[in-house]
Image: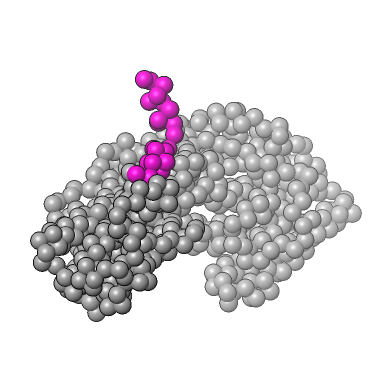
Amino acid sequence: MESATTSLVGTSISTPRWNVDRPFLTGRFHQETKSTFHEPSSSGVDKAICCYHAAIQELIVIDDLLSSLVGIEGRYISIKRARGKEDSISFQVDASMDLALQESSKRLFPLCESYLLINQFIETRSQFKTGLVNHALAAALRSLLLDYHAMVAQLEHQFRLGKLSIQGLWFYCQPMMGSMQALSTVVKKASCSNILGSAVINLLQSQAKAMSGDHVVRSLLEKMLQSASSAYLGILERWVYEGKIDDPYGEFFIAENKSLLKESLTQDYDAKYWQLRYTLKGDIPSFIANAAETILTTGKYLNVMRECGHSIQVPVAENSKLTSVSSNHHYLECIKAAYDFASGELLNLVKEKYDLMAKLRSIKHYLLLDQGDFLVHFMDIAKEELMKKPDEISVEKLQSLLDLALRTTAAAADPCHEDLSCCVERTTLLKRLSMLKDLEVNQLVSDSHNLDEPVSITGLETFSLNYKVQWPLSLVISRKALTKYQLIFRFLFHCKHVDRQLSGAWQVHQGFRKLDMHGMAISVSSLLCRNMLKFINSLLHYLTSEVIEPNWHVMQNRLQTAKSIDEVIHYHDFFLDKCLRECLLLSPSILKKVERLKEICLQYAAATQRLITAAFEVPMAPQMEKFNRLKLRTKSQMLKPATEDSTVFGSIMKFEREFTAELQSLGPIFSSGSRAEPYLTHLAQWILGVGNDQ
């Protein structure tokens, strides 16, 4: 018994074979088996009808017509089917029959043919594989044929009483002709195309509109439409009220891709879970075509809440059930109400229970350097490790240092700081940007060798932070969104590093100023250092105060007024894309220039102590001791020969020329791109005036 049950579960439901092999169980066996099984001839059966008197012929013809009305061949009326064409049926009369009776019989043949087609449709579309809509339509047609059979039985009763003439038969059958022919047209089209589901509903609806001139036929077709769509509305109702697809025969216009898992949102940059987990198919019932996207979204929202373990069901009043497709479009109001409820519940769940804004603020603190005290401490204690090559860096050691920095600064008060972790990339920022094909860069980098990895790349160029995000917040803060945050963080982090190095160089110059050293090399180097600091500080101010902060406040205000989770996702993605664009990360030509300027600044900062102290006899010692020792020496003791001072001066001037040239080369780029990208004008005002005071 258990094995039998297992085999049934593992296979699809199908109609028993004996239903096909035994034609006596169908309504077609009379004509199909006539050629095989011949009854012995009896007196008068094979006699030509013309041998009978006209009155007798009429009785025989009426008897045959009553049989033909229910698909049974008579003695002198036969059924012909075209070989290989199931819907090609015709009735023929004995050629020797009275001409008046022939014409009267032929007027009733369309009704007989319609009955056969409808009956055949009922039998074939009652099988499991044809789907719920066809089952419902077949059931409605079967109910209609019960009335038809009752009419034929009453006519036969009148005939047995001798009260029915062939003209009376035509009179009683005529009202059914239009309705049966309209239904036969529908079933013929449905059979030819072998359609199911929403296609059947659309066919019924189009045929009903086409019969607008015949009120009776249109009412009948609309009744068939209501019956056929009731099964479909049952599937639809469960989707918009519970978020479940109960579609055993694949008729629903929403498809589910179970291979796409929600975990992919936090792992895969190109995850398509939200877009492709549930999608619209091609065939959509025309009466809900305009609301298809709303229906899809409603069920998606309910599914998210169910995935969270949050049991939710749209409250359904008796008048809110999707039971019929009425002309007053009440079903559309029910769908809209279900959407509003599901959207509001999911938005409250994400905002209140999972506190989306707190998570976004936490990410802003760390990845957008909104609160930089922990970063200063981390860069101090992790400097030695970050100076190594990416392959030599211990991520575990960096993580422990990051945890220490978080615990000993104001970040410790943030309950989300434990979700932060560190990672080390293997490529530069420019190379990483070129690998993300979906980013809409303003211009492509034409020279591929420009993206070659520098030989001296260190952890300072490749260090980044990662953030752990749980479902359902991963819908908003997906792996793609986090990657964009990380790109901005890497750019800001490296700018901070350059700023720290230049600040150290500036402190060296200040130390010599205290000693009243005013040589040419000191003066030029001090001015260059100040210009470099002004450049990097202007760039940092632009990135944080002119780009990130204003865009953040715009996004925050929009999120507070968002009506659905899709709006939240859109506003958040728009914020990130705009920040990437205005932070120059989508403009490789400008970014490459900025990276070159930062490289010059770092080279200068590293060479400052060596170059400046080269002009003086200063022993290498910690900075505070160095200042004290310098105070003990006279100017004459510390000054080096003029030739050596000129060499130092030449090296400083080389840095100055390189820095000025790269900075000025940004001017034409800003000018040419400012019309398409207005923010470039604002950026130019901040950083192009750096060298004007030299």
In this view, which residue lies farthest toward the right? 643
Residue 678 appears in the figure: yes
- Badge count: 0
Q: Look at the image and tell me in which quarter the N terminus lies.
A: top left
Q: Is residue 228 above or below residue 100?
A: above
Rendered image quadrant of residue 149: bottom left
Left or right of 566: which side holds 599?
right
Residue nearest the observer in this picture, 481 or 32: 32
Residue nearest the observer in this picture, 293 or 55: 55
Residue drawn at x 75%, y 48% as measured from the top left: 453
Left or right of 551: which side holds 234?
left
Residue nearest the observer in this picture, 108 or 590: 108
Instruction: Judge whether residue 146 is colored magenta.
Output: no
Instruction: Judge whether residue 8 is colored magenta.
Output: yes
Q: Is residue 400 above or below residue 129?
A: above
Residue 510, horizontal then vertical, whole percent = 64, 50
Residue 353, horizontal then vertical, whole percent = 29, 41
Residue drawn at x 44%, y 31% as measured from the top left: 10
Residue 544, horizontal then vertical, whole percent = 50, 56
Residue drawn at x 73%, y 43% as measured from the top left: 457
Residue drawn at x 59%, y 48% as measured from the top left: 490
Residue 440, horizontal then vertical, whole percent = 59, 62
Residue nearest the observer in this picture, 691 or 382: 382
Q: Look at the image and tell me in which quarter the C terminus lies.
A: bottom right
Magenta-drawn segment = 1-24
Q: Is residue 564 above or below residue 307?
A: below
Rendered image quadrant of residue 174: bottom left
Q: Looking at the magenta stretch, what is its main secondary structure?
A: helix
